């Protein structure tokens, strides 16, 4: 089983955007699970600094995750979406709303840093990298994990040479990791059952897992490890904004939905005023919408306005616990050993 020789078969999901601090990654790995750095939005230099910090905090294996680049899209007419976003901006700032233009980090440059730093585990989302990239990591001894949302995607990943596959059920918080145009939105247990009959390499279950009881169900369905994201957002070491953590722990718990309104790519988040306002309108594709709303969402977090934030959360988020990462891991491990 190529799962980094984990003492506890738990992987902390590589959530991008600052949640997966080096402190969180190291705390998870030090507890016997696998910590993960979500580096999709990070520059090569930021990635290198974070990896070095993680190495200074743990001697155990850890994972670094990157986003496979999106196909280029022609720039759409942004007039309507800017008209919809402007009132929100005006609530947060006295300055005039302007479209924020930026380019995603260069994937090849990110990969080079990971190779130079010899990361123990390299994982990727939103597609499959060139065969040479996977081979380079495996040649130097790194494990390679891909993300699939259908059995067909899983087979493509197996054929590419990955060591294990993260099966992402539709219950997952944050972005869907699909890379095929058709997404049937399989729930996790159905996805595991179908994929277990399709591929031979280890499967990692992801999607709505918040405790040991749910984890145990995925083991019975064929998973060799579980990956949790939302459960780690409210941990002490998480880099999530305090307002974000409070929103996950607050009662009563609003529902979640899969929506493109924040980034242009389907992602599960808590339903709030931002979702209500933009849902149903034509949304520019990722990463255009991501960059259009990035500063607005950041300002909302600074000003404690959860109704305008992208509150990524899986369907099981009402079970979040405000504890440190090691305590969470040990509690979950104890639960699935019962």
Image (cartoon, rainbow, N blue to C red):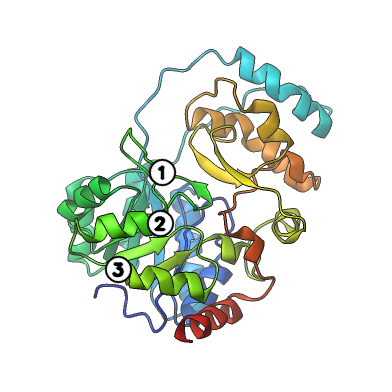
Query: Quick one: SS at disc 2?
Result: helix
Q: Earlier in the sequence, mark 2 or mark 3?
A: 2
Residue 34 makes an appearance in the image: no
CB-based contact (under 8 Å), mark 1 and mark 2: no
How packed mark 2 is, by other alpha carbons closer than 10 Å (few <14, some 14-19, many 20 or more), is many
Q: Look at 32% across and 59% down and name the residue there.
A: 192
Relative image position of residue 190 (x, y in whole percent): 35, 55
Relative image position of residue 184 (x, y in whole percent): 37, 40
Q: Earlier in the sequence, mark 3 or mark 1?
A: 1
CB-based contact (under 8 Å), mark 2 and mark 3: no
- Taking depth in this image into account, of 3 and 225 the one nearest to the observer is 225
Q: Look at 20% across and 59% down and name the residue there.
A: 197
The residue tagged 3 is 222
Examine the rendered structure and indicate whether residue 125 appears above or below residue 122.
above
The residue tagged 1 is 185
- Taking depth in this image into account, of 153 and 90 the one nearest to the observer is 153
**Relative to 122, is 21 on the left or the right?**
right
Q: Which mark is residue 315?
A: none
The residue tagged 2 is 188
């Amino acid at each position: 089983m190529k799962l980094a020789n984990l003492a506890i078969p738990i992987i902390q999901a590589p959530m991008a955007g600052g949640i997966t601090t080096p402190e969180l990654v190291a705390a998870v790995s030090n507890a016997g699970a696998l910590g993960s750095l979500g580096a999709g939005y990070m520059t090569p230099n930021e990635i290198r600094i974070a990896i070095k910090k993680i190495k200074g905090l743990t001697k155990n294996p850890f994972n670094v995750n990157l986003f496979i680049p999106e196909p280029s899209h022609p720039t759409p007419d942004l007039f309507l979406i800017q008209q919809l976003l402007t009132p929100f901006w005006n609530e947060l700032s006295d300055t005039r709303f302007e479209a924020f233009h930026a380019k995603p980090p260069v994937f090849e440059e990110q990969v080079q840093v990971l190779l130079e730093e010899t990361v123990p585990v390299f994982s990727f989302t939103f597609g499959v990298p060139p065969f040479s990239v996977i081979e380079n990591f495996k040649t130097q001894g790194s494990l390679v994990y891909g993300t699939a949302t259908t059995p067909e995607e899983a087979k493509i990943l197996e054929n590419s040479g990955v060591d294990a596959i993260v099966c992402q059920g539709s219950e997952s918080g944050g972005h869907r990791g699909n890379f095929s145009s058709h997404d049937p939105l399989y729930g996790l247990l159905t996805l595991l059952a179908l994929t277990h009959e399709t591929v031979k390499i280890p499967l990692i279950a992801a999607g709505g897992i918040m405790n040991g009881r749910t984890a145990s169900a995925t083991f019975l369905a064929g998973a060799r490890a579980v990956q949790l994201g939302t459960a780690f957002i409210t941990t002490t070491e998480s880099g999530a904004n305090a307002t974000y953590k409070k929103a996950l722990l607050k009662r009563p718990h609003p529902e979640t939905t899969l929506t493109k309104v924040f980034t242009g790519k389907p992602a599960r988040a808590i339903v709030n005023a931002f979702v209500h306002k933009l849902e149903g309108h034509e949304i520019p594709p990722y990463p255009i919408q991501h960059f259009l709303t990035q500063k607005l969402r950041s300002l909302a977090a600074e000003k404690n306005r959860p109704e305008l934030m992208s509150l990524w959360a899986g369907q099981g988020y009402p079970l979040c616990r405000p504890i440190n990462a090691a305590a969470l891991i040990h509690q979950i491990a104890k639960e699935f050993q019962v």
